[in-house]
Amino acid sequence: MRRLAALLCVTTGALVTGAAAVAAPAPIPLTLITVTNMLHTPEFVAVEKGFFLKHGLNVKFVHTQTGAEANAAMESGSAQIADVGVTSVQAAREAGLPIFMFVPVLNDATTDVGDSPLAVVARADSGIRPDDARSFVGKKVGLVRGGTGDVWLTTWLKKEGVDPKQVTYLNVQPGDQLVTIQNKNVDAIATWEPFQTLILDTMGSQAVLIKRGGPILGYTLGIGTTDSYAQSHPQIVQAVADAIAESSHWVRTHPADASQVVTHWIPGLSAKVAQDAIRNIPFDPRISGCTARAFAAATKLLYEQRKIRAVMPTDQQLTDRFVRRTQALYPGLFGDLKPIPASCGR
């Protein structure tokens, strides 16, 4: 009887082990080309806190500094998904990379002009004055040419009646912006979080915040993939959307902890700067009519500024079908967000 009981235990154990193996398949490997800044905090949290793994994905990062670099890396075929933005999708598609955004990371779905993570800071001795576009005339501004800081600052200057040709733009990558303004190679820096907060924290009274946000530009960043990959792997794309929504909820409800996590991924970023910067960044994965309008407005601006050759339909750049599925499956992940106003539409 003891031998039979032991045999039954071994057999039952084998069956349980086999059932568990079937129920928990190995996570699917996936490469994400990410831009190394705080605007992508939910991506870093999703890896470190296991949200990607929870949704069956083993995500590895390829790090870049800008959306343009992410597009170039995606075009090489080394990754399945990549960070994309409201000002980078159009350029990518025009260049022959048929990519679109399927889940926002940085976003505020309640407005089409949410741009609080964008700012311009200047040296205190530069002569540039807060909220005074005219004071930029004859000055040098460091920014990523063709990037969101470029589009945002150019739009503001034009709105205030200043010809951007009266301002000298120097191409300065995010990782070089602090030392560039410290060395007085530029008078100001137009950039995104956490780089303006880093400049202000490091330089103290020697730097001044000139303008944060606007509202000037609807600023949305998220994760995108190609048309063909989404068609052939819809379940994987859906799993990414689900994981990002869960991670974004955790970031919103644990901002101090999220600030600590992001310091593990951005070299030289202190917890103090991260905690100050995260207050300016909305992490809303919903896609509303306002989100779509932000894309349409950005496309128009890029065309007017001759950064793209033609205006393309918004539905080629953005889709809500995956996020809406996430909202149906996991409504609790969205309960803390502000309701989308009727003015945004569907």
Image: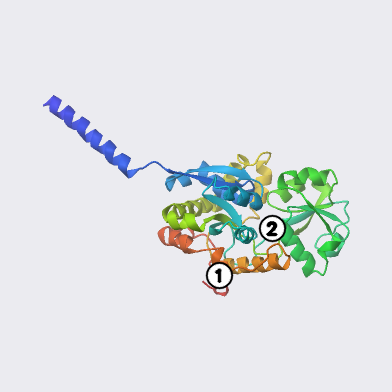
Upstream in the sequence, badge 2 or badge 1? Answer: 2
Quarter residue 314 falls in: bottom right
Give how far across and how far down residue 98 sits, in percent.
55, 58
Q: Quadrant of residue 149?
A: bottom right
Q: Residues within 10 Å of mark 1 (few under 14, many from 20)?
A: many
Mark 1 falls on what kind of element? helix
Q: Nearer the viewer, residue 173 or 5?
A: 173
Q: Visible in this render: residue 74?
A: yes
The quarter of the image holding the N terminus is: top left
Nearest to the eye among marks 2 and 1: give it. 2
Q: Position of residue 267 (x, y in %)?
A: 66, 39
Residue 225: x, y in percent? 53, 55
Q: Is residue 305 above or below residue 245?
A: below
- Amino acid type of the residue tagged 2 in the rendering: Thr
The residue to which callout 1 is attached is: 289
| 99 and 64: which is toward the camera | 99
Residue drawn at (83%, 50%) of the image = 186
Q: In x, y percent, where is residue 234?
A: 43, 56
Q: Which residue is mark 2?
A: 148
Q: What number is the disc on residue 1?
A: none
The local crowd at label 2, few if under 14, some if 14 to 19, many if 20 or more residues have their Cα within 10 Å, is: many
Along the line of sight, which residue is nearer the eye, 191 or 259?
191
At a point 42% along the width and 62% down the height, the residue shown is 328
> Residue 288 occupies which quadrant of the picture?
bottom right
Distance of label 2 from label 1 (alpha carbons): 21 Å
- Please say if 132 is above or below 52: below
